[in-house]
Image: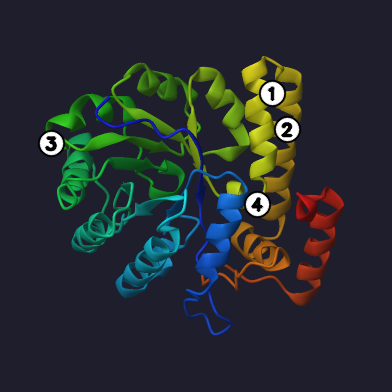
Amino acid sequence: MKYPRIEGFVAATFTPFQTDGSLDLEGVEGMAEHLEKNGVRAAFIAGTTGESPSLTLEERLGLTKKWSEVVRGTKLGLMVHVGSNCLADSRTLAVQAQELGAMGISAVAPSYFKPQALSDLIDCSASIAAAAPGLPFYHYDIPMLTGVNHSMAAFLEQAPAKIPNLAGIKYSNPDLVTLQECLAQTDFDVLWGMDEALLAAMALGVRGAVGSTYNFIAPIFHKLVACFEKGDLVSARAEQIKAVKFVRALSKRGYFASAKVLLDLMGLKGGDPRLPHKSLSPTEKAEFGVEMRVMGVLEI
């Protein structure tokens, strides 16, 4: 491989907001400390979890700058999602990420005017990756949100000709057959992006993952990995189903709104999500807090 594999957990971080909806950059430091304390390998900022489509370019630049300052001198790495419907904005973000010393960049496909052919997707990715030639580039495959559903195995076969700094894929896709085809191309890294099925992905060879639940229940996943490596699949499955139930609990009232409330309950700064995501009502917040306590999440 041209670049070392990323192993362990990368937390897709939430973007903290003030009560008036503006960025709360002071919340970044607490999040970073929490992730490092819980053995998370790196922060993946301004992605889906970070509500990047709802952030202005200036906000994303400010968020990246703050994170780069906070992780400097720590063991926590920094991956920057730079994807956007505007490729010029993506390139601007990629340039900044390289200047600030990020460990890598990633980008989703444009999703309003969609790349109709795989070659179009490769051209879009190449345009972004070329702006930060010194950084590993990961294409972020999440077809359920972008509506762009090209074969990632074919992407890995064809894209290196135009993307010399291609490191791999952030694979948020339930297609385990294509996942196997991607993993078989051993020159590239594949980071798993569906926390609820990590155990299945690990059985196929995945060793690194990017996900939002690592913000909250990383210790459960550390146990899952330890059990898997010992060959104790019964215990590994028990840890995995805990994660599934956790995601179900967050999704019941709205994933983003619930996750932001949970950050606040943990003493971190979340704030409310931006529209079109709804916020929880006071009653829903109280009910959700009780549910998290019953599940033991706040004691993890």
Residue drawn at point x = 62 percent, y = 28 percent: 225
**Residue named by callout 3:** 162
Question: Neighbour class for label 4 at 10 Å: few (<14), some, many (≥20)?
Answer: many
Q: Does residue 135 appear to the left or right of 70 in the view shown?
A: left
Q: Is residue 197 above or below residue 75?
A: above
Q: Which amino acid type is shown beneath numbered disc 4?
A: Phe
State the SS at label 3. loop
Q: Earlier in the sequence, mark 2 or mark 3?
A: 3
Give residue 186's quadrant in the image. top left
- Where 203 sits versus 149, above or below? above
Residue linked to disc 1:
227
N-term mark: 1 or 3 = 3
Task: Report if the CB atoms under discs 2 and 1 are less than 8 Å apart.
Answer: yes
Residue at 76 percent across and 29 percent down: it is: 238
Residue 245 locus on image (x, y percent): 74, 42
Local SS, label 2 = helix
Q: Amino acid at mark 3?
A: Lys
Label 2 vs label 1, nearer the camera: 1
